[in-house]
Image: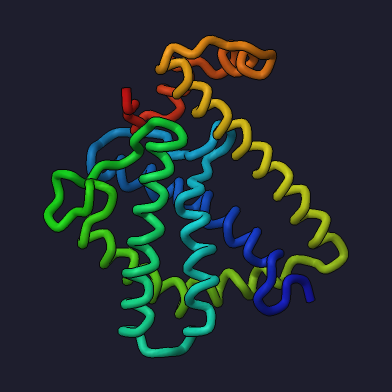
Amino acid sequence: MFAKGFNIYKLIWIFVITSFIGSLFEILWVFVSAGKLMSRSSLLYGQFSVIWGFGCVLLTIVLHRLEGKRDLLVFSVGVIAGGCYEYICSYLSEKVFGVIFWDYSGYSFNLNGRINLQFCFFWGLISVVWIQNIYPFLSKHIESIPLAYGKQLTLMVLAFMIFDMSISAAALIRMNQRQQGITATNPISEFLDEHYDDEYLSQRYQNMKLMC
């Protein structure tokens, strides 16, 4: 059986699947709440929200031993883990890429605009549903991938995701440099300026706000 139990292959597929589903969920949420059709992908290619992907991987690592435990315990751990994770992601987005992807300053009980109590509770609810219902369902179907080519397919998908995340991160870092007036000094910077300029990235990341 492929990826039986708790292992790296299963975590890779959980990351990819939930990144895709999370992006679609955000697109639907924005459309229903604001009437706008907006890309919510974290990456340049495909619809993948790595915030959701890494978040679900984190929840799986932290909570997989709590499967079948009391919902209140899972909820409490999820509130803390999810809140810390979202705060760190917000901080890194600002410090590394110089951009803001979300701002909760207008919400009650927020912490530096990075997290708020309402969404921390949301992380708790997601944790309960995830570990008690969604994770067992996904785990079963991931394990149904034929063993004959499961590892090879996983490595191909992983290679694509690493490329997508790397080029996306490089493009955002280079955009931050351009905002600071740093000119291209090497072929990589020139390539990024030519193919992923500010206008292109603004269209791709429509909910992004620049720090400067």
**Percent x, y of residue 122:** 29, 64
**Percent x, y of residue 200:** 48, 18
The residue lying toward the viewer, choosing from 92 and 201, is 92
Instruction: Kindly identify the residue that appears in the image at 51 percent across and 48 percent down.
Output: 50
Instruction: Kindly identify the residue that appears in the image at 53 percent across and 37 percent down.
Output: 43
Q: Is residue 51 left or right of residue 8?
A: left
Tally of numbered discs: 0
Please determine whether, in this image, residue 184 is positioned above or below residue 155: above
Instruction: Kindly identify the residue that appears in the image at 55 percent across and 74 percent down.
Output: 137
Q: Is residue 3 left or right of residue 210?
A: right
**Percent x, y of residue 105:** 18, 44
Where, by quadrant of the figure, is residue 150 drawn? bottom right
Please determine whether, in this image, residue 105 is positioned above or below residue 110: above
Instruction: Kindly identify the residue that appears in the image at 73 percent across and 45 percent down.
Output: 159
**Percent x, y of residue 60:** 52, 70
Quarter the N terminus occupies: bottom right
Q: Is residue 111 left or right of residue 148?
A: left
In the picture as drawn, the residue positioned furthest to the right comes out as 148
Quarter the C terminus occupies: top left
Please determine whether, in this image, residue 22 is positioned above or below residue 205: below
Q: Is residue 111 left or right of residue 65?
A: left
The residue lying toward the viewer, choosing from 196 and 87, is 87
